[in-house]
Image: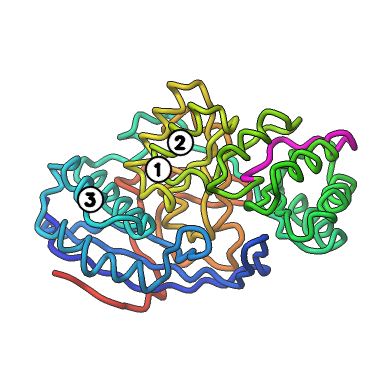
Amino acid sequence: MKIISVEWGRVSIPLRTPFKTALRTVASVEDIIVKLTADTGDVGFGEAPPTGVITGDTAEAICGAIEHHIAPAILNQEIDDFEGVTGKVQAALVHNTSAKAAVDMALWDLYGKKLNAPVFRLLGGGKTHIVTDITVSVNPPEVMARDAEIAIQRGFDCIKVKVGVNPALDVERLAAIRVAVPKETVLRIDANQAWTPKEAVRILNGMQEKGLDIELVEQPVKAHDLEGLKYVTERSFVPVLADESVFSPMDAMKILQMGAADLVNIKLMKCGGITNALKITTLAELYGAQCMIGCMLEGPVAVNAAAHLACAKGVITKFDLDGPMLCAANPVHGGSRFEGKDIFMSEEPGLGVTGVDGVVPLGQVK
């Protein structure tokens, strides 16, 4: 099976409600779809969101990386040499992990189709179902409480709450949500780098002292501030999850060696795809740490790929794959089924995706 064509285009999917964090506000998913075609007629699909504020990758950068660097590196390469061809993707250029992730997942899709097995089975997975949380965007406390109630009505029992905009309000936000949802609801929070280390410790411990019962906090301080992250981890009553601090297996190893976080968040867009994500899971196993599998504001193709990894690796114990649940429509045919909080895996070969509606073509190399 040889790669004879690399295509890419843009898909736009409206959100149910605007997505607001300490870093950005977004009204729709605007992702790049990648399609690899083999000489057998098989196709592999991948996806990348341009999340410049986190990854530094704009839509133009993703398309340029694919056209000028990644596509020439993998064109006419044999899928049989899978380690070699995925290695060429990672070596094609520095950074631009989102472009690498999109092509990497498309290669895994083709590899599974060649071997007539779903990717999660190829990776040794036996799980066919996972349960995700859903995100409540940062807003005034009463709006967030209402959004949390809606999430509960939709069947979710684990809510990730965005905080960090006006830190003085964060305790009030969580208190309003805790009152609005059933007692057994799991609450986790994501500060998206918004706090200083001392501020984080004060806020987090204040939340727990008020009985808000927070499961974990995601990236409380700046991504580069590993000493600050360690400061919070050592002093917080709330377990700390490293997110924006983890872009590579080397980042994960450093954080785990330092004890800078209790858990690490794997996002395919930050690490460059399934291939590198597997290395992070191996490191977590060695250090006895758990992982969350997360996503940017991604559509069903990319989240489907992350779900395959999640179902294959027991070290991934927490699931934040709500991108498709935040969307008002699903243009993807095949792949995982997203039903409320439940993600059900397809037993079709590869990633199971057979097509994506509404893709505007942007380029092709063949």
Q: Give the residue number, with chain letter if any, for mark 2.
A: 252
Q: Quadrant of residue 167?
A: bottom right
Label 3 is placed on what type of residue? Ala
- The reply to whether the C-beta atoms of the residues labelled 2 and 1 are less than 8 Å apart is yes
Label 2 is placed on what type of residue? Ala
Relative to 239, say whether 94 is above or below: below
Helix, strand or loop under label 3: helix
Q: Quadrant of residue 328?
A: bottom right
Left/right of residue 113 with respect to residue 270 in the rendered view: left
Q: Give the residue number, with chain letter if any, for mark 1.
A: 248
**Residues under labels 2 and 1: Cα distance?**
6 Å
Residue drawn at x 17%, y 65% is 5
Residue drawn at x 41%, y 35% is 280
Residue 158 in sight from this viewpoint:
no
**Residues under labels 3 and 2: Cα distance?**
19 Å
Left/right of residue 96 with respect to residue 303 in the rendered view: left
Residue 264 drawn at (x, y percent)? 53, 36
Residue 112 drawn at (x, y percent)? 26, 44
- The segment highlighted magenta reads 208-219
Q: Give the residue number, with chain letter if any, for mark 3.
A: 91
**Residues under labels 1 and 3: Cα distance?**
14 Å
Q: Neighbour class for label 1 at 10 Å: few (<14), some, many (≥20)? A: some
Earlier in the chain: of badge 3 and badge 2, it is 3
Residue drawn at x 41%, y 52% is 335
- The reply to whether the C-beta atoms of the residues labelled 3 and 2 are less than 8 Å apart is no
Whether the magenta-drawn stretch holds residue 212 is answered as yes
- The reply to whether the C-beta atoms of the residues labelled 1 and 3 are less than 8 Å apart is no
Q: Quadrant of residue 57?
A: bottom left
Helix, strand or loop under label 2: helix
Earlier in the chain: of badge 1 and badge 3, it is 3
